[in-house]
Image: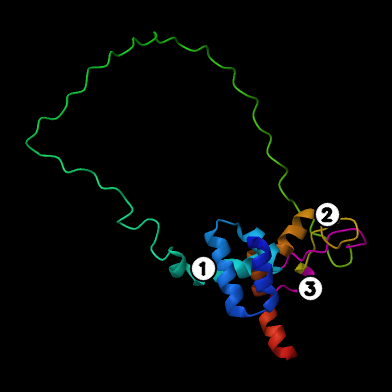
């Protein structure tokens, strides 16, 4: 009876202790976790767990990098003469050549600065950005909106859309528009 057939026969018993023992024996035989898992029709993680829990029985109880496993260097006598290294010839360096002056690159154009149109409530229309540009206590006559062309199917331009999703700026806007007070009042 081959070893694999014997292991499968043990697995057919469904005796947990017998299966654990068979898994450990298969691991000792050098089989991979995947192959053992296929033979027993179990998951590879189960095989790894069983082998890990029985590692002392297998002989892997000590760490591989224990101090006993690391070879130590032989002690040297401090009075013994140290070996001298032979001098290494230094190669001659190539003469330094001045580099030709490189042409300066064209100046980089700065992106357009966001400049809102500051439209009033009555001037704002469909397709224009509706981002508010006023402080909390501004009178109605001083309340303006951005007014730049809005993104398709949106209420804000690309710049104000970024402002609305920016966490810090949203927090500042909430503070500026006094949303905390409004939320408390609604509750």
Q: Is residue 135 magenta?
A: yes
User: Would residue 43 be seen by someone viewing this image from the given angle?
Assistant: no
**174 relative position to 67: left or right:** right
| Residue highlighted by disc 2 | 148
Q: Counting other residues with Cα less than 10 Å from the Cα at mark 2, is it few (<14), some (14-19), or many (20 or more)? A: many
Residues 172 and 79: in front is 79
Residue bounds of the magenta highlight: 124-141
**Residue 52, disc:** 1
Q: Quadrant location of residue 117?
A: bottom right
Q: Secondary structure at mark 1?
A: helix
The dominant secondary structure in magenta is loop
Mark 2 or mark 1: whose residue is earlier in sequence: 1
- The N terminus, quarter of image: bottom right
Foreground mark, 2 or 1, reads 1
- The percent position of residue 46, horizontal first and vertical second, equals 62, 70
Foreground mark, 3 or 2, reads 2
Q: Tell me what residue is drawn at x 65 percent, y 65 percent.
A: 44
Q: CA distance from mark 2 to mark 1?
A: 65 Å
Mark 1 or mark 3: whose residue is earlier in sequence: 1
| Residue highlighted by disc 3 | 140
Residues 160 and 12: in front is 12
Q: Tell me what residue is drawn at x 74 percent, y 51 percent.
A: 115
Q: Relative to 90, does residue 187 appear above or below in the rendering?
A: below
User: Would residue 78 be seen by someone viewing this image from the given angle?
Assistant: yes
Q: Counting other residues with Cα less than 10 Å from the Cα at mark 1, is it few (<14), some (14-19), or many (20 or more)? A: some
- The percent position of residue 146, horizontal first and vertical second, equals 79, 59
Q: Secondary structure at mark 2?
A: loop
Q: Counting other residues with Cα less than 10 Å from the Cα at mark 3, is it few (<14), some (14-19), or many (20 or more)? A: few
């Amino acid at each position: 009876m081959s070893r694999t057939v014997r292991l499968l026969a043990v697995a057919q018993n469904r005796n947990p202790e017998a299966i654990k023992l068979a898994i450990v024996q298969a691991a000792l035989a050098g089989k991979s976790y995947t192959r053992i898992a296929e033979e027993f029709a179990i998951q590879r993680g189960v095989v790894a767990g069983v082998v890990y829990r029985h590692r002392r029985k297998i002989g892997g109880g000590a760490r591989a990098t224990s101090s006993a496993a690391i070879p130590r260097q032989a002690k040297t006598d401090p009075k013994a003469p140290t070996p001298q290294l032979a001098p290494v010839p230094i190669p001659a360096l190539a003469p330094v050549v001045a580099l030709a002056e490189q042409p300066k690159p064209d100046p980089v154009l700065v992106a357009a600065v966001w400049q809102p149109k500051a439209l009033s409530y009555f001037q704002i229309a469909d397709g224009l950005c509706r981002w508010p540009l006023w402080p909390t206590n501004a009178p109605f006559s001083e309340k303006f909106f951005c007014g730049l062309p809005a993104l398709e199917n949106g209420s804000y331009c690309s710049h104000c859309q970024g402002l609305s999703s920016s966490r810090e700026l949203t927090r500042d806007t909430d503070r500026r528009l006094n949303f905390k007070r409004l939320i408390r009042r609604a509750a």
